[in-house]
Structure formats: structure tokens, C-alpha cells
């Protein structure tokens, strides 16, 4: 229920779908896509997280029984923050988590830390996006729930980081684990096939964050099933 948030238990491995603001994944289409994700998640016994744009959070969270994350959260208290996205409103909208520092909405490190702490107080799960090993290590030191490693040049390219730059993932995993042994690590950028997901898991990550392969697809159910096949129960 709104205002009574509990920290979600995200089963691993996890597939997180960022709807961005694609026309195919906004408004009522966001609800339909989220329902497709829910159907596949339950059929295959795999954890799928959906991340609609902020105006769609309420309607999507009311329509599905899988984790719904915001695409962003700002630090700050309710009151004088016109145009900002505050954690309290995300809880009221039915969110159980949020992305932070996506490449399309970068944040200062101090703001990431503040947002992570505020999310903890609200029982919101935090998924911090990072673009290189140094940022990944800095983010890991803030103790978020999860980190998604996403070289920005590969986002939306259809070229998977696990194939194009596998050393970025494996090396970053080692550096993150040196400072934080508990944080969940995801692979992002260019993920589009089950082979990409399988490669990401083999490189030491515990799931993937992707967008266009599902959110822009004419057949998202088929794409989701293909992504899940290598990690299904």
C-alpha cells in the first residue's frame, strides 16, 4: 500500500527493464509492457524489475505485482524542490526502488550519497548506474543495494558490453568486491540477447539492466523469453 513501503527482496539473477521515455513504453503502453514482464517473470520464475518514467509509476505499480522502480530520485526533503523527484512521492506512487545516476541523468557523488541514505530510510532499493571502474568503486563505497556498470558509448548501440568490452566488467567486478563484498552487480549497455545475459553472468555479475531491446520491441514477450532462457529455473 502507498506510504507503507517495505524493502523488496530482489531474487538473483535479475533482469531490470528501463522503459526510458520510449513512446512504446509510456502511458497505457507502459502498463501493457509491465504486464508482459510480469507474465514472463511468473512463467519462468525469474525476477524482472520494471522502470517506467515518473508520470507512469502510479498506474504501473497498481497494475502489476513485480518490482516497480523509478528512473531517478533526487535528494531533498518534501517542500521547496519544484520539479524534483523525491523519495516520499515514489513510495506513495507504489515504487519499491529507484535507479540513480543513469548516463542520461548524471548526479554529483554527494547527491548520490544523499539519495542512497534517504532511500534507505524509506526502504527503497537503490540501483546506481556507473560508467567506468573508478565511478563504480566510488559508488560501491556508498553501500547502495546494487550497481549497474554501463559504458555510455554502448547504451542503445545493440553492442553488448559483455562482448565488446568484457574486461571492463570482469575488472570492475574485482575492484568493486575489494571495497564492497555484498552489493549486487549488474551489467548494462547493449544487452539484447540471451547470449548477452549468459556472458554477463559468467563475467561475475548477477543480472542485467537494459532498455531498448525490450521497450522498443514489437514482440517484447519473445525478447524477454530469449533473455531469460539461459538463467531460467
Image: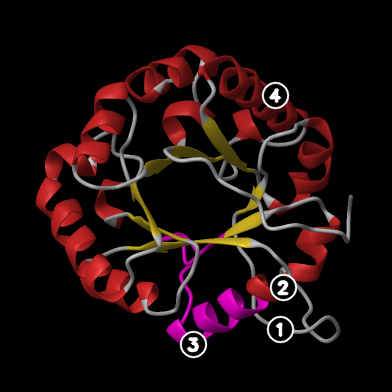
Left or right side of 209 for 94: right
Query: Would residue 155 be counted in the magenta stretch?
Result: no
Q: Secondary structure at mark 1?
A: loop
Q: Few, some or many C-alpha atoms within 10 Å of disc 2 (few <14, some 14-19, many ≥20)?
A: few
Q: Nearer the viewer, mark 4 or mark 2?
A: 4
Q: Which of the marked residues, 4 or 2, is nearer the chain's N terminus? A: 4
Tag 3 residue: 110
Residue depicted at 57% across the width and 24% down the height: 41
Name which of mark 1 and mark 2 comes first in the sequence.
Answer: 1
Range drawn in magenta: 99-118
Q: CA distance from mark 4 to mark 1?
A: 32 Å
In the rendered image, which quarter is residue 162 located in?
top left
Gap in angstroms between the C-alphas marked 1 and 2: 8 Å
| Residue at the image point whose x is 71% and y is 83% from the top | 76
What residue is shown with label 4? 35
For the residues labelled 1 and 3, the Cα–Cα distance comes to: 12 Å
Q: Residue at x 82, y 46 (%)?
A: 58
Q: Secondary structure at mark 4?
A: helix
Q: Is residue 231 above or below residue 210?
A: above
Q: Is residue 108 magenta?
A: yes
Please give the name of the residue rendered at 65% of the width and 51% of the height, measured from the top-left corner.
8
Give the labeled residue for mark 2: 84
> Do the CB atoms of the residues marked 1 and 2 lie less than 8 Å apart?
yes
Q: Position of residue 122 (x, y in %)?
A: 73, 70
Could you give the CA–CA distance between mark 3 and mark 4, rounded to whole angstroms? 36 Å
Any mark on residue 22, and which?
A: none
Amino acid at each position: 500500500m502507498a506510504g507503507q513501503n517495505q524493502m523488496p527482496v530482489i531474487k538473483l539473477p535479475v533482469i531490470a527493464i528501463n522503459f526510458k521515455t520510449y513512446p512504446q513504453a509510456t502511458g497505457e503502453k507502459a502498463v501493457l509492457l509491465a504486464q508482459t514482464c510480469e507474465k514472463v517473470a511468473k512463467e519462468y520464475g525469474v525476477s524482472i524489475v520494471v522502470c517506467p518514467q515518473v508520470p507512469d509509476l502510479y498506474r504501473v505499480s497498481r497494475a502489476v505485482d513485480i518490482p516497480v522502480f523509478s528512473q531517478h530520485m533526487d535528494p531533498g526533503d518534501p517542500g521547496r524542490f519544484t520539479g524534483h523527484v523525491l523519495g516520499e512521492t515514489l513510495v506513495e506512487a507504489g515504487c519499491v526502488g529507484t535507479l540513480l545516476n543513469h548516463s542520461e541523468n548524471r548526479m554529483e557523488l554527494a547527491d548520490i550519497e544523499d539519495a542512497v541514505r534517504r532511500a534507505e530510510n524509506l526502504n527503497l532499493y537503490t540501483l546506481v548506474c556507473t560508467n567506468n571502474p573508478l565511478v563504480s568503486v566510488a559508488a560501491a563505497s556508498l553501500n547502495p543495494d546494487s550497481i549497474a556498470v554501463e559504458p555510455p558509448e554502448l547504451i542503445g548501440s545493440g553492442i553488448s558490453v559483455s562482448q565488446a568490452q568484457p574486461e571492463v566488467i570482469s575488472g570492475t567486478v574485482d575492484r568493486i568486491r575489494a571495497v564492497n563484498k555484498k552489493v549486487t552487480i549488474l551489467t548494462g549497455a547493449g544487452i539484447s540477447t540471451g547470449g548477452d545475459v549468459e556472458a554477463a553472468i559468467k563475467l561475475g555479475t548477477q543480472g542485467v539492466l537494459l532498455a531498448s531491446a525490450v521497450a522498443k520491441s514489437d514482440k517484447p514477450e519473445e525478447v524477454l523469453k530469449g533473455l531469460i532462457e539461459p538463467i531460467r529455473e
